[in-house]
């Protein structure tokens, strides 16, 4: 039972264009959502998060959108850079970091 | 910048042997997590500690896995006996009590 789904295993984008990574969840009790980025041979690193009381959070080139009615969130990267090439994980928790569940990840390739 | 330390980075063992992984969280972080990540999947929570207490071990295969955090600082995850299906990356993360988790580099386990 996958409570957090990232349906696109990979995404390829041209440098300078927008990258949009999607994530769906099934548990309406999740109240906090996070995106992590992972390079090979390293642990995931925190990128950006959003509370369920908001529908948008922005940090530089990264913006996360939350649509609670659709149980969907997305990560927008504008403009995309070759250094953004990595695996991106969506995660959701019940609050306070409890019961954190990760999606399977989306591998982003940004072509120069 | 403070980091989560894990050792060893790589471990090769034969099935039925015992293995142990060590994690030293960022100083002052009360919450510690152990995850297992199988290739092509997202991290799966095995156990969550708050100080020295287990707050969630519902996904920990308790017949062979054990975890402890005796003094509420560093932690050990043990597998005995190891099985072929245990081959994976074992990630440790810590948090100061907020949502964001800080991950170590992981221990890659190969069971032959």
Image (tube, grey):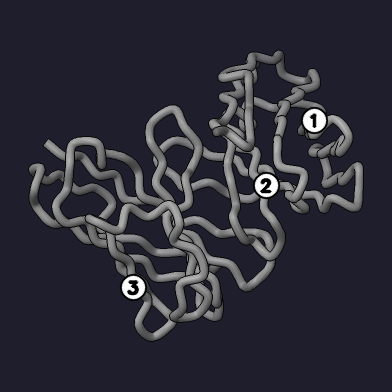
Residue B36 spot, x, y in % from top left: 39, 46
- Residue B97 placement, left or right of A53: left
Do the residues under discs 2 and 1 have CB atoms within 8 angstroms? no
Provide the chain ID for the residue under circle 3: B
**Badge 1 is on which residue?**
A76
Give the CA distance from mark 2 to mark 1: 17 Å
How many marks on residues? 3
Q: Quadrant of the C terminus of chain B?
A: top left
Q: Residue at x 31, y 40 (%)?
A: B88
Which one is in front in this view, the residue at disc 3 or the one at disc 1?
3
Q: Nearer the viewer, residue B67 or A111?
A: B67
**Badge 3 is on which residue?**
B68
Q: Nearer the viewer, residue A105 or A101?
A: A101
Residue A63 got which mark? none
Q: Judge if badges 3 and 1 mark residues of a common chain.
A: no
Q: Secondary structure at mark 1?
A: strand
Q: Secondary structure at mark 2?
A: strand
Provide the chain ID for the residue under circle 1: A
**Badge 2 is on which residue?**
A92
- Give the quarter of the image for residue A60: top right
């Amino acid at each position: 039972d996958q409570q957090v789904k990232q349906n696109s295993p990979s995404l390829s984008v041209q440098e300078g264009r927008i990258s949009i990574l999607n994530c769906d969840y099934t548990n309406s009790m999740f109240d906090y959502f996070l995106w992590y980025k992972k390079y090979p041979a390293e642990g995931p690193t925190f990128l950006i998060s959003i509370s369920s009381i908001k529908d948008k959070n922005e940090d530089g080139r990264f913006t996360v959108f939350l649509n609670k009615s659709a149980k969907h969130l997305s990560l927008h990267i504008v403009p995309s850079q070759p250094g953004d090439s990595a695996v991106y994980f969506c995660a959701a928790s019940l609050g306070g970091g409890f019961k954190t569940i990760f999606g399977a990840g989306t591998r982003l390739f940004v072509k120069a | 910048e403070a980091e989560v330390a894990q050792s060893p980075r790589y471990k090769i063992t034969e099935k039925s042997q015992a293995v142990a992984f060590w994690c030293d969280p960022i100083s002052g972080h009360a919450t510690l997590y152990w995850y297992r990540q199988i290739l092509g999947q997202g991290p799966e929570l095995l156990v969550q500690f708050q100080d020295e207490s287990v707050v969630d071990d519902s996904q920990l295969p308790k017949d062979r896995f054990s975890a402890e955090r005796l003094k509420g600082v560093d932690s050990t995850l043990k597998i005995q006996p190891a099985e072929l299906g245990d081959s994976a990356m074992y990630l440790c993360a810590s948090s100061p009590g907020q949502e964001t988790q800080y991950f170590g580099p992981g221990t890659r386990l190969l069971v032959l």
